[in-house]
Image (tube, grey):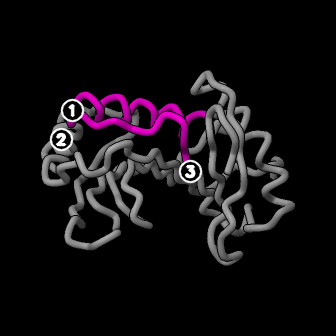
Amino acid sequence: MTYPPIPQRLTVKRFLERPKTLERVAVVPVFHRWIQEQATPELLIDVADYRHIANGPGVILVGYQADYGLEQTEGRPGLLYRRKRDFPPTLLESLQQAFRHLAQAEQRLSQDLDLVFRPQELELALVDRLRYPNTSAAADTVAPSVVQAAQAVFDAPAQVRRVDNDPREALAFHILFGGDVR
């Protein structure tokens, strides 16, 4: 196994600047159009609507390799990209791919729904506790690749800190571009 290992699943989330402007009902037809137009590099399959769940998954564009979603977990609405198969051969390339696909979807959603995202903030989770346990050692191993990938894709200085969450949860990072990491 290469080290650091290739993840089996990861998520990247960009938060909305003005979440109150999101008309979640408008997302469903937009995601259906994305399927018809093959708007992403992944094979898109269906749209799942969970808008009825408070602070839940929202509207999910389900794909074979990855899912996209406008969701509102933890009371912070944003665009979530979830990669679940067919990863590139290294962690760095996997992170770069995820960041690029998120940025492309963000740009398209900004046009389709007139949404504004917070460019200075991302959240990354390596949803693979076997390969990436939620420990300081794993975080120290992964953090340089996270910074390198974020800076390469977003062309801005990035700082990263590990999210202080339950050790049973996924290893997660808060990424800020410019300014201090809080």
Looking at marks 1 and 2 on the same chain, the residue that comes earlier in the sequence is marked by: 2
Mark 2 and mark 3: Cα distance apart in space: 24 Å
The secondary structure type at the circle numbered 3 is strand
Q: Residue at x 14, y 47 (%)?
A: 26
Q: Nearer the viewer, residue 6 or 151?
A: 151
In the rendered structure, find residue 154 and report the number of the disc placed on it.
none
Looking at marks 3 and 1 on the same chain, the residue that comes earlier in the sequence is marked by: 1
Task: Give the residue pinned by disc 3.
Answer: 123
Q: Which contiguous range is marked in magenta? A: 96-123
Q: Residue at x 32, y 44 (%)?
A: 18
Amino acid type at image mark 2 = Val
Q: Nearer the viewer, mark 2 or mark 3?
A: 3
Q: Is residue 12 visible?
A: yes
Residue 43 falls left or right of residue 65: left
Q: Residue at x 17, y 44 (%)?
A: 32
Q: Are marks 1 and 2 in contact (CB under 8 Å)?
A: yes
Task: Give the residue pinned by disc 1.
Answer: 112
Task: Give the residue pinned by disc 2.
Answer: 30
Amino acid type at image mark 3 = Glu
The secondary structure type at the circle numbered 1 is helix
Q: Are marks 3 and 1 in contact (CB under 8 Å)?
A: no
Amino acid type at image mark 1 = Asp
Looking at marks 2 and 3 on the same chain, the residue that comes earlier in the sequence is marked by: 2
x, y percentage for residue 68? 37, 48
Q: Nearer the viewer, residue 66 or 31?
A: 31
Q: Is residue 91 visible?
A: no
Q: Nearer the viewer, mark 1 or mark 2?
A: 1
Q: Main secondary structure of the magenta part?
A: helix
Residue 151 falls left or right of residue 46: right
The reply to whether the magenta stretch includes residue 113 is: yes
Q: Residue at x 73, y 67 (%)?
A: 134
x, y percentage for residue 5? 76, 51
